[in-house]
Image (tube, rainbow, N blue to C red):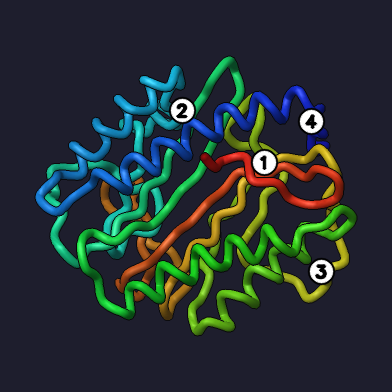
Amino acid sequence: MAIPLRKSNEIAKLRTAGEAVAKTLEYLQHNVKPGMTLLEVDAMGEEFLRSLGARPAFKGLYGFPNAVCTSLNEVIIHGIPSETVLKEGDILGLDIGSEIDGWYGDAAITMPIGKISKEDEELIACSKDALYHAIDVIKEGMRFKELSKAIEDFIRGRGYVPLVRFCGHGIGKKPHGEPEIPNYVETPNVKAGPKIKNGMVFCLEPMICQKDENPVILENDWDVVSKDGLRTSHYEHTVAVVDGKAVILSKV
């Protein structure tokens, strides 16, 4: 399947959807506190997102029951909101999708709950820094596999490992599409596969594990943890390739 090349007016619509996600994540960063439940975080995020004229794209997607993925501590992605109460020292991943006028936005952060350990600060920094490193190195004509290798090398250079079997993705009039963008490479030849072109729009999302890159899906069939059972982190932006480089669409 060919990767769509978006026109400038289409990228503008994707930016509108991405900005709604970014504003919601910023709002949650400032308002989520110890003592709140994950369900309260989800409700707060959904209400704010809808106030911006966006539909929560994850609600009902593939059967996901809520608007916000709330991935707590060891959960790296797809955390279902629950009555679990946030405590000082927790780290919380928030992943949100939006839809406005048929176009989608998607972004994620991992945030501290109150004061956290230096080890957790470094863990969160790895996913955030890997994301911005990837955005910086994108240029028209490079292969997606080269981008995946750049992300993996950055993560491993910090002493962590990338989660396997989950990846970044294309986005547009559907929340997920081509290309798939893993945070690692499985073959030594990175000069194969599709090239990055102007007009492509996709989501990059480094998912960081401490020791074991293999995922385990918990009993609710959604929450994903690392096999090592240790804390994890995740960051994501939607980007468009414009004039040969990546431009972030999911920012305020």
How far from the left and from the top, in percent, is residue 211?
42, 80
Cα separation between marks 4 and 3: 25 Å
Give the answer, above or below, for where 51 lies relative to 35: above
Give the answer, above or below, for where 46 lies relative to 160: above
How far from the left and from the top, in percent, is residue 5?
82, 34
Cα separation between marks 1 and 3: 19 Å
The residue positioned 59% from the left and 18% from the top of the image is 102
The residue positioned 40% from the left and 53% from the top of the image is 77
Reading the image, the residue beneath label 3 is 190
Q: Nearer the viewer, mark 1 or mark 4?
A: 4
What is the crowding at mark 2: few (fewer than 14 residues within 10 Å), some, or many (at least 20)?
Answer: many
Q: For mark 1, give the secondary structure.
A: strand
Quarter of the image for residue 12 reads top right
Q: Earlier in the sequence, mark 4 or mark 2?
A: 4
Give the answer, above or below, for where 60 lies relative to 137: above
Q: Earlier in the sequence, mark 1 or mark 4?
A: 4
Reading the image, the residue beneath label 4 is 6
